[in-house]
Image: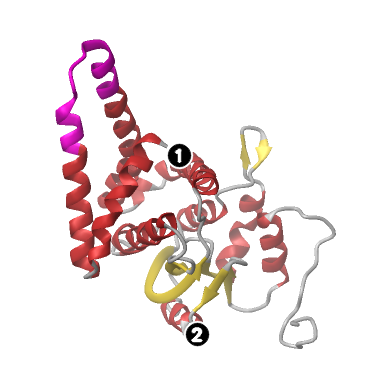
């Protein structure tokens, strides 16, 4: 359909070389001042480009992302949970980071980049290796960290809405989460050198994101060991996790003005056990 439209230039690569290589080929063929990255399973609201462009008027901003929602939210109980997870990730985590001009990951489904900034970074971006092999995951987080290292700010635009398809069963969801977790831990080492130049809140945020899951796993294993070895029920561990979960979900429900966020507490056992 678009091949016959003169406004579009379609690039067909000879082989499937992965998202990163395809993305780089498109960027290098581009000529505009701004580059918009959109995943193939994502639908943009009509005003997304306009709202991201307004934010990018500031030359110090290298990248900006919109707010993600699940386009298939109503399909299963899991898609409903993931939609709430996306809301929290965008409107708590990214929104807080944006207060300090450093969103730590401009998400792939909807992110706008300054092409002049990309031109400085593409060689580093293309040459990333992980355990001796070319990296094939975590493109958005890595590109964002490179943007921050180069001295550009990264931003979040909450009213630029993009709807993306999310996993509707546990298998694909857990594989997605594993990729994201690997990306987070891997790129944290790259971000550590960057943190002294940023606001102290961002250091606390990055440490919390990486240590939080490890401490949660450790406390759960310790509670399980107490149950198996000592035969006593670890009430305090359970009550603490329940209390923290309900506080977080209640705050989200108040901020979003939606009771459904109380149901996000069901995500906690997935987080702990899976």
Q: Secondary structure at mark 1?
A: helix
Q: Is residue 110 left or right of residue 159?
A: right
How far across and how far down the image is residue 80, in percent?
39, 60
Q: Is residue 252 left or right of residue 57?
A: left
N-terminal of the pair, mark 1 or mark 2, is: 2
Foreground pick, 141 / 228: 228
In this rendering, does residue 26 appear at all? yes
Would you name the residue on which mark 1 appears? 185
Q: Alpha-carbon distance for marks 1 and 2? A: 35 Å
Look at the image and give the residue range highlighted in magenta: 222-240
Foreground pick, 121 / 176: 176
Was residue 234 drawn as part of the magenta stretch in this picture? Answer: yes
Main secondary-structure element of the magenta-colored stretch: helix
State the scheme by which the image is colored.
secondary structure
How far across and how far down the image is residue 123, in percent?
66, 53
Would you name the residue on which mark 2 appears? 46
How far across and how far down the image is residue 248, in percent?
21, 52
The image's mark for residue 80 is none
Q: Is residue 36 above or below residue 123?
A: below
């Amino acid at each position: 359909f678009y091949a016959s439209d003169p406004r579009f230039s379609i690039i067909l690569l000879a082989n499937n070389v992965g998202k990163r290589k395809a993305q780089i080929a498109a960027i290098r063929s581009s000529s505009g001042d701004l580059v918009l990255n959109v995943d193939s399973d994502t639908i943009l609201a009509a005003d997304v480009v306009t709202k991201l462009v307004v934010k990018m008027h500031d030359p110090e901003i290298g990248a900006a992302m919109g707010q993600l929602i699940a386009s298939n939210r109503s399909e299963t109980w899991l898609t409903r949970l993931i939609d709430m997870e996306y809301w929290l990730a965008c409107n708590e985590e990214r929104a807080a980071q944006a207060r300090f001009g450093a969103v730590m990951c401009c998400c792939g489904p909807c992110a706008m980049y300054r092409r002049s900034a990309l031109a400085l970074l593409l060689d580093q971006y293309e040459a990333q290796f992980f355990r001796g092999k070319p990296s094939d995951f975590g493109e958005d987080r890595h590109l964002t960290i490179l943007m921050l290292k180069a001295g550009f700010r990264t931003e979040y635009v909450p009213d630029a809405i993009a709807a993306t398809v999310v996993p509707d069963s546990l298998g694909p969801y857990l594989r997605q989460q594993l990729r994201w977790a690997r990306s987070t831990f891997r790129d944290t080492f790259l971000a550590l050198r960057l943190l002294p130049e940023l606001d102290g809140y961002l250091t606390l945020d990055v440490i919390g994101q990486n240590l939080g899951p490890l401490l949660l796993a450790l406390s759960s294993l310790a509670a399980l060991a107490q149950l198996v070895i000592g035969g006593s029920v670890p009430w305090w561990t359970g009550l603490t996790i329940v209390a923290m979960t309900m506080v977080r979900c209640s705050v989200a429900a108040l901020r979003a003005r939606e009771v459904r966020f109380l149901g996000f507490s069901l995500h906690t056992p997935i987080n702990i056990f899976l």
